[in-house]
Image (spheres, grey):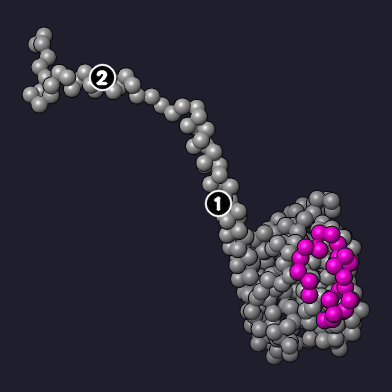
Amino acid sequence: MPDTFHLPPDVRPDDCILRADNMKTRRGFTLIELLVVIAIIAALMAILMPALQLAKEQAMAAVCQSRLRQWGMVFRIHADDNDGKFFTGAKPRQGTWWPLQLKDNEKDWKRNKTWFCPKATRPFIDKTNRAVPLELRRSSHAWGIYNGVSVNGCSYPSTGNGIAGSYGLNGYLLRVTDDYYSGVSKSDGWQSYPPSQDKRVPVMLDALQMQLWPTPFDKPPEYPAAAWIGEPTRMRRACIDRHNGSVSVVYGDTHTEMVGLKKLWKLKWHRSFEINGPWTMKGGVQPEDWPKWMRRYRDY
């Protein structure tokens, strides 16, 4: 090999010296510069996170309403196939445990994802029939799983994955042979589907029970988790903070909307339900009458 190195004709010796000097003076970020960059990134994240969280909440609310709308269509189809008659419930005397009358593919909570609001997908009873302790239950829990067990005289089939969900049916839609579980006369129930005032009658909504029989006198839960405590089929099971002070509702005409928690007492649950009852502004309720956790929400 040659013992001399020849520069290319277009490169001068001075150029090499300058490049070497530049390499010697190169350096990385200083600690202060690095901290400034981190601070800028943190500030951007602080600005973007609420917007991202809001977008996520809105997306889940949209999915929730879409699933309820599908339930509205299921009920319409069932009524059309049965001369306008709705379910009677597994115990027709008072209309309880209506999901047992669904088709097998509609019952199964794993095969039918429309059972769940995307913010409440974990049943409070697991496959081994163990329940989440009462003090740990939240609005993000679903009811069920009922599978191969007997509850209040109703036996659930042990085939499939069982029944569970995070929505509740307006029990006054069910056809009964006796008065309703709440004591309301059967003549005040809707008995057919869609109900005659379908744009005002709630059909199904976010809830902690598979069916509900609210009355105008039902008190709201004292604190959010108290929705699991007390009378299991009344208004408190739907008065849950699942969508920032609202719940998703589908009506008899299959339209859906977000309903403020205090507005639940203004819905036409049954024919004689007093929509200006004691828990409404026209009925005389005062802001301080509501539990502290609900006072910041809109009044109706």
Tag 1's secondary structure?
helix
Quadrant of the image for the C terminus?
A: bottom right
Q: Is residue 259 left or right of residue 92?
A: left
Asked if residue 235 shows in the view, the reply is: yes
Q: Is residue 7 left or right of residue 98?
A: left
Residue 185 percent across, percent down from the top left: 89, 84
Q: Which of 28 and 88 is in front in this view?
A: 28
Name the quadrant containing residue 228: bottom right
Residue 67 percent across, percent down from the top left: 63, 70
Tag of residue 48: 1
Q: Nearer the viewer, residue 161 or 246?
A: 246
What amino acid is found at the position of numbered circle 2 in the picture?
Answer: Ala
Viewer-nearest of discs 2 and 1: 2
Quadrant of the image for the N terminus?
A: top left
> What's the magenta region?
275-300
Residue placed at 79% from the left, 78% from the top? Answer: 266
Residue placed at 74% from the left, 82% from the top? Answer: 201
Q: Which of 90 and 204 is in front in this view?
A: 204
Q: In this view, does 115 lie to the left or right of 226?
A: left
Sequence-first tag of 2 and 1: 2
Tag 2's secondary structure?
helix
Residue 56 percent across, percent down from the top left: 59, 58
What amino acid is found at the position of numbered circle 1 in the picture?
Answer: Leu
